[in-house]
Amino acid sequence: MNFDFSDDQKMMRDSARKFLGDRSSLKVVRQALESDATYDKALWAGIAEMGWLGTAVPEEFGGVGLGHLELCMIAEEMGRALAPVPFASSVYLATEALLMAGSDAQKKAWLPKLVTGAIGTMAVSEGTGSPKISNTHVRVTNGTLNGVKWPVADGADCDLLIVLARGGDDRLSLYLVDARGKGVESEILKTMDPTRSAAKLKFTDAPAELLGVAGQGLELVQAINDHAAVLLAFEQVGGAQASLEMAKEFAMQRVTFGRLIASYQAIKHKLADMYVATELARSNAYYGAWALSTGSSELPVAAAAARISAIDAFHLSSKENLQTHGGMGFTWAGDCHLFYRRAKWLAHVIGTNRFWKERLISQLERKNAA
Amino acid sequence: MNFDFSDDQKMMRDSARKFLGDRSSLKVVRQALESDATYDKALWAGIAEMGWLGTAVPEEFGGVGLGHLELCMIAEEMGRALAPVPFASSVYLATEALLMAGSDAQKKAWLPKLVTGAIGTMAVSEGTGSPKISNTHVRVTNGTLNGVKWPVADGADCDLLIVLARGGDDRLSLYLVDARGKGVESEILKTMDPTRSAAKLKFTDAPAELLGVAGQGLELVQAINDHAAVLLAFEQVGGAQASLEMAKEFAMQRVTFGRLIASYQAIKHKLADMYVATELARSNAYYGAWALSTGSSELPVAAAAARISAIDAFHLSSKENLQTHGGMGFTWAGDCHLFYRRAKWLAHVIGTNRFWKERLISQLERKNAA
Amino acid sequence: MDFNDTPEEAAFRAEVRSWLEANAPRKQNANESMRGRHSEAELLVMAKKWQAKKAEARYAQITWPKEYGGRGGTPMQQVIYNQEEANFLVAGGFFAIGLGMCIPTLMRYGSEADRQRYVGPALKGDEIWCQLFSEPSAGSDVAGLKTRAERDGDGWVINGQKVWTSGAHYSNFGIIITRTDPNVPKHKGLTMFYLDMKTPGVEVRPIRQVSGESGFNEVFFTDVRIPDSQRLGAVGEGWQVSLTTLMHERLAVGDSPGPDFDELFELTKMLELEDGPAIKNSAVREKLADFYVRGQGLKFTKFRTMTALSRGQVPGPEASIAKVVSASKLQDIASFGMELMEAGGIIQDKDLSPAAGLFQHAYLYAPGLRIAGGTDEILRNIIAERVLGLPGDIRVDKDLPFNQLKAGA
Amino acid sequence: MDFNDTPEEAAFRAEVRSWLEANAPRKQNANESMRGRHSEAELLVMAKKWQAKKAEARYAQITWPKEYGGRGGTPMQQVIYNQEEANFLVAGGFFAIGLGMCIPTLMRYGSEADRQRYVGPALKGDEIWCQLFSEPSAGSDVAGLKTRAERDGDGWVINGQKVWTSGAHYSNFGIIITRTDPNVPKHKGLTMFYLDMKTPGVEVRPIRQVSGESGFNEVFFTDVRIPDSQRLGAVGEGWQVSLTTLMHERLAVGDSPGPDFDELFELTKMLELEDGPAIKNSAVREKLADFYVRGQGLKFTKFRTMTALSRGQVPGPEASIAKVVSASKLQDIASFGMELMEAGGIIQDKDLSPAAGLFQHAYLYAPGLRIAGGTDEILRNIIAERVLGLPGDIRVDKDLPFNQLKAGA
């Protein structure tokens, strides 16, 4: 039994923490909040330089050729630092999609770019609701795409789009679209987390190329999301942990009625609950990491459990961190809301908690029937 | 606006509290727990003598001719005292059923008996599941009833049974059965609350008489349960309040680490939560009482809200009262489990919380569509 | 038990209603509001006009004595007026703190000259008052205040900082609690004053909240000189004076604004989940039921309070129930509503987001409601101590002089 | 990251498995158990036989040194043995407290003669030990004990009462903490002894629990005389000695027994609700998902702890997570399972109730798990203080002599 990351992997985490501590401090995050910029370009360039974008990409496509366990370690730190960059969209979604379903030519065309800082993302939703045939209207006819997708995370900044659309046969498939090519217009949307960006994309005869097997669009989206769920869970665990530490630090210096607020059971037990939720989420995320890194058939179940647990932990920790801060907590100038907002962003980005609970139980029924 | 009980009604509550304080102390309840008796016969006789069994029964049928508001006041005290008698079965269910659906002859035949101490109850369930056509197998053919019902609250002690059964037309109707007559066998079942009794009843050609309109069995059961839900809600509020008071009393005398446990926020906030739940339940019960007493069309919604709120409050208060007591709480000799058990009994007796939540939303949809 | 007015109440309600019909437009729907359509400055002008009209008809502060412009009415009449006014589209909200808390304090502790000078203009809406109590390092623990007032000849000089002051930026006057003696235990060295917000040395800075709005301010005091005649109550008795003010605050605490069961119910009818309309999903239905039951419980708890009022009783700290339940309920409803929108739930765009971003906005201001006017934790303490009679938290600082307390207090 | 044994671990596992195959019957299914089929007296006989066999093969206490009958193995080997033994139908459980807590204390603080006399018989299951710590008025606060031991010539006389003593009724010996000096602050006047449970003046009375069972006892001491040679540690140092014992307790805390996700999942497949099978109801599915995720979180947290063990690290108080989560999860699962049975849910009849009353029974013993071995509230304090490093609760009694403390302490 060795249910832990290796020392090398942990060293990777430590160096990521150090790098992001310098380059993605809460001051940097706040600049993203206050400015009109959709992401921090300098930080993104630095991350590309560190090679993180290609952590799990084979060397033949320009990557570092490490695995998903190493990527999990980086993800945890990205979450802790609230890094205001399109890492999730580009690395967990677009890169994973190409690795999973891309032809050799597609991988060769795009992976080296993504690894060096080009931005990819997926365009799946058309408003509210989780994607299904009845609410997907974007259509590909004769190799060109038409319609509207929203919200698309980092949709205004990306170079590569992976779009879920109806093909000529009316079945759903994934398509690659050059976001800098013709027929793609974007409009930036206001989101719950202004340190992360989302867009509405309008396609007008945009050239599109099939990715993966035709008609397998929904299955592919789910398979990609299973990967992303584990990686996002590490981001969320990182965020929950940071929220807990922030709450603890405040409680250890704030005095009321002559005592540190950390000495009141209302605060002690609140922080204990945050700790418990975060540790359970971490354990579930570890199992997800194992399933992801070994290509286990347990991945659908493990990914769902990791995601549910991580959403719950970051939700609880971010809102109770704010509550622990009292008046300071709900000012714009205080940093609590940076976590509170990011927790919501991450909870929605590839299907919410209720969506994944339903998926978890379906998968368990399937396993059970088998 | 006069959203409160009248002084006369409150006086009735006070005198019920006094009577039950003497006659249904926790010592008396414990005797019911420890003995094989299915209810406390002396207490039941005393209650009959007080006239409470006929509180809402018109004088022409031997009742006191007061209303449901007065009955709510008594119910609250029955709940507080955990009275080990078939009050709910006989008064909230059987008596209400006769008042609602009985012919004049049926009322004349049975109400004067019930008012003076005969015991009535309803036999609806056949095992698990809420009653519907597919799980109701008991059948009436040519005026006689055959099949098995369980659990039937107070089924081993009753004089009158109101049974949900399939008629000759295969529709569900209610039937009156003389429980002391031929063809009725009972077997006492072990329940979660040994201070209240339940039975399995086997009917073999038992004579049965239609109650209310044929084919309206399920609708009648629900209408009767709407009445009972409000009255039970008062019992549950009484029980929740008593649990809170018991927890408070213990916390105000138990010392640990040199302080009253009542001075720790973990206990203070626990008790505050019990108080809040109990007061919300009380307010919802009040609205139910108003709807019941005025025959308002709001009753289905008000009864559901009262029941859900009351189940939650008694559940929380009874289990956290036990928790507050620590080690003493989980001994047989301690009294906490009397409340813990009764809370479960009351939560299951006419449909559980999840059943009533579904009913509440259906009713709100209906109202909303109208 | 009934929901009907007494004959006297019904008569008063009819009178109010006909006056309102004659003087204000009816709302087209229950959620219609002036806010959002107008700037704060515009709303302020309209509110002052409406307040003047109300004052003239003696509906402004119904329970106040006639000599101060009230009508010597009952609390129940005030409730009835509020219920009726809620059906009309009028601007308000600017005067609640002044008339609800500051002026009652002035009426009790000010001089006759003060009352003559200030009550009328406040009632008519000509002058607005704010309450300068909270400080950066004294949130829940109001008694740990640092803002100093020092004797200076016939008057006082104030230095320090207040925070969380609602409406300081549009207020003409404020009541302020200050520390006048740091050498005695912390509840004992406080003194209350009132002052003109234009007095030299007073600087108001808005605080931006998480939701982006600014309803609160920081107020800085630098050598602010005021005469002793602006003192309210005796020197060193500011704590007792503030209790009067805060008692009025508790009565004023209402429900949390924002989406409630009705809005969520509508949303679930509108949204599609994987397996059909959200309203048909049993998990959604159970959550809806929970929210409904909590909301109704609060509504009828308020009816019980109003009944007590109607009988001339004073409602107790039970009113804390409303705040502790409704603030976190709002946060939960907002979060759940967003969750039902799936990916679209994080979009805060009024045109794109279902319900025009109502749930998203509420998720951002709900945390403030769990904190302002007493945190959830303080309110549970209040319920435990004042309602249930449990012991207070252990105090380590009760009898220490203020200047020997730990930093931060 | 992998779930595989190291080569050494795999070899040990294979050895254990083949020994078990040769000496015990395999379970037919995972939930099969001896309990319920046999009386406690029968189980005790079988358990002693099995323990003797284990001891002979040196599997009884794998981490103990060889000279005491152990095999000087690693904690991970003990975990592997336990995992493998769990697949076989054997009686056990009677020796956990003695071998896990009492004998380690005796090994550390007893004389060489004590070790020679007691360790062997305890290991072989010939003699059973219990731990006499809790008292009626000292639940969470073990240091507030009242049971007195007074000097009497060469020995001591014990008077008082213990409570919550597991297995006192079948134990041969016990270790007992007593107050030997009431004139010093409460942690300082304590002394530890061991004694024969047959010593005159010792009376054991079973405590009936809410669920009807009796696993615990009250033990009364009336003028119980023991020699000074039965003292463990110095006079007045009982508190330090007890910390050793309790540290071993924390390691022994396991999961809560009873219905978990799997049993609930099966139940939902079996039961019909209004609209079809319970498993198809989305409210039920969401609840199932919540329970699954919590259960898996605990399982993998334990894997992380085992990994630490396997690396020779000592697991910290994080283990408190398991108890605080699993006890209330059990209570919730039990309650929910009953709820799904509707009216039938209150029936505790093994033949009638689905799952043979498993959920009903669990609902009655779950409260005990939220209390025994540290209440939920104490465990949250432990997490807050020992894991997160937050301050301890304010102590008002720390330096007071025991006999000046408030009643009840």
Image (spheres, coloured by chain):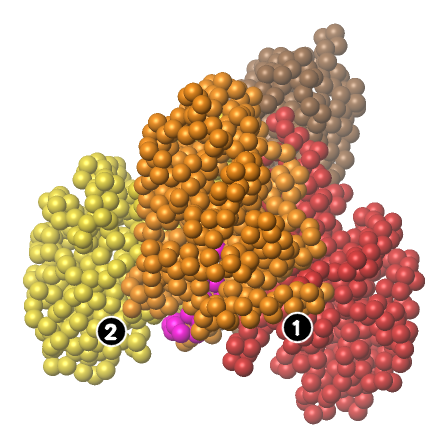
Chain colours: A yellow, B red, C orange, D brown
Position above or below: A177 against C361: below
Please, which chain is the residue tagged with disc 1 on? B
> Can you give x and y, in whole percent of width and height, for residue D136 in the image?
71, 31
Disc 1 target residue: B299
Asked if residue C58 lies left or right of residue D43, the reply is left
Q: Quadrant of the N terminus of chain D?
A: top left
Asked if residue D122 lies left or right of residue A323, the reply is right
Which residue is located at x 70 percent, y 80 percent? Answer: B220
Q: Nearer the viewer, mark 1 or mark 2?
A: 1
Q: Residues within 10 Å of mark 1 (few under 14, many from 20)?
A: many
**Was residue B346 drawn as part of the magenta stretch in this picture?**
no
Position above or below: B117 against D227: below
Amino acid marked by disc 2: Gln
How far apart are the alpha carbons under marks 1 and 2? 51 Å
Asked if residue B301 lies left or right of residue A61, the reply is right
Which residue is located at x 60 percent, y 70 percent? Answer: C14
Disc 2 target residue: A216
Query: Residue B161 versus residue C381: which sits nearer the camera?
Result: C381
Q: Secondary structure at mark 1?
A: helix
In this picture, which residue range is highlighted in magenta?
A: C256-274
Please, which chain is the residue tagged with disc 2 on? A
Q: Is residue C390 visible?
A: yes
Amino acid marked by disc 1: Leu
Query: Residue D201 versus residue C356: which sits nearer the camera?
Result: C356
**Was residue C259 drawn as part of the magenta stretch in this picture?**
yes
Position above or below: D26 against B146: above
